[in-house]
Amino acid sequence: MKNLGMGLVGPGFIAAHHLDAVRRLGNVDIVAIAGSNLASAQGKAREWHVGHAYASYLELIDDPRVDVVHNTTPNHLHFDVSMAALRARKHVVSDKPLATNAEQSRVLHEAAVQAGVAHVVTFNYRGNPLVQQARAMIGQGELGELKFLHGHYLQDWMTDPNVYSWRSDPQKGGASSALADVGSHWCDLAEHVSGLRISAVLADLTTVVPVRYSSGASAQAFSGTVGETRERIDVTSEDLGSVLLRFDNGAKGCYSVGQVLPGHKNDLQLEVNGRSASLRWQQERQNELWIGRHAQPNSLLIKDPALLAGDARRYAHLPAGHQEGWADAFRNVIADAYAWIAHGGAPEKKPTALATFADGYRSSCLIEAMLRSHSRGGAWETVEPNATTDKGQS
């Protein structure tokens, strides 16, 4: 069979990991990359050993060798790039957020369904084998009725006021910063693992660092400072927040998000409490799943393909005692994406764990509900009903 051709738009931090994951599949040709200008695209093409570079995403999309477009641009470009690819009937793999607002996300989802192509959002933590194990255990009823979901996603890469990123600019990152960047991952993980849907939110948000200093460049996540400070920039988007949650089965929940908390590098944690048992997964200890029980010993399930539930087992590629990490989980998501693409994006062929543009639209609705809640002084805000009932269908 002819290899699928992949083109990538937006050669930033996450782009290298898209290319690595695709190369690990072995049946996809990386055709070209496109950047903000030809010189930068050519530089990245040489660095990443990609055969062709384009100065425009439209040129890349027009290349007949490109079957799949990976959209790894800054947030404000997501809509235009993905929509152009959909109009050309190209499959799309987009980083989150799907777009900078819910209305654009809805339009993209509807356009993707109409185009009849595969449409994927890289909520990459779904690709971890123990995340899928937790999902399987909950689906089999091992936790009993779910009552409480809680956790956090905490980082420290924006602690220094001399770090300035486009994520802090509403014109490029959207109205939300920390919620959209990492809080979206937590919400997607909670809903995917539990099978529940968040029906209402109450958010308390703040900006810990209201003034930042830019050297003229934009820091990438986890990259630290970017040279000498120059321009003072007032920041209004949140870098810290907490959200109370109500789920559609009556369960309660809460989570905190922050990117200015010293010592927290990529501290994602989800705990699900049922009437019979509890589960806790931590991204920084991702080869472990804590299982809590009443009147019985607690236990720790260490990643071992022989011990995982059926569908979770295929996400573990190494024997027990061999650690698998962030890049391996990301590769699993990309593998699911290309399995769907190989079937032409037919809805009935979509792998169960794969996030689609429907999930991206839902994520946008959740973030906007949280922003509305905060703007109303911390009032309960109902999540858009259509987004609540979608349940991630393609």
Image (spheres, helix red, strand yellow):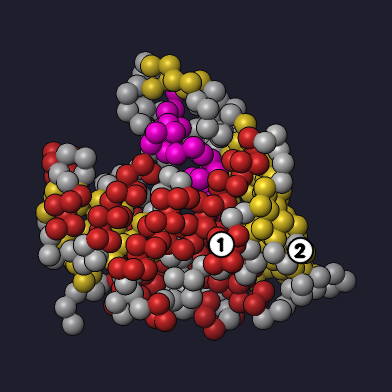
Packing grade of label 2 (10 A; few <14, some 14-19, many >=20) is: few
What residue appears at the point 61 percent right and 41 percent down from the top-left corner? Answer: 372
The residue that mark 1 highlights is 386
Question: Magenta includes 162?
Answer: yes
* Magenta-highlighted residues: 161-185
Closer to us: 196 or 388: 388
- Is residue 376 visible in this depiction of the protein? yes
Magenta stretch prevailing secondary structure? helix
Helix, strand or loop for disc 1 = helix
Q: Farthest right residue?
A: 295
Is the N terminus in the top left, top right, bottom left or bottom right quadrant? Answer: bottom left
Task: State whether residue 76 is above or below residue 252.
Answer: above
The mark found on residue 250 in the picture is 2
In this rendering, position of residue 215 left or right of residue 192: left
What residue appears at the point 49 percent right and 37 percent down from the top-left corner? Answer: 175
Q: Position of residue 176 (x, y in %)?
A: 51, 39
Amino acid, disc 1:
Asn
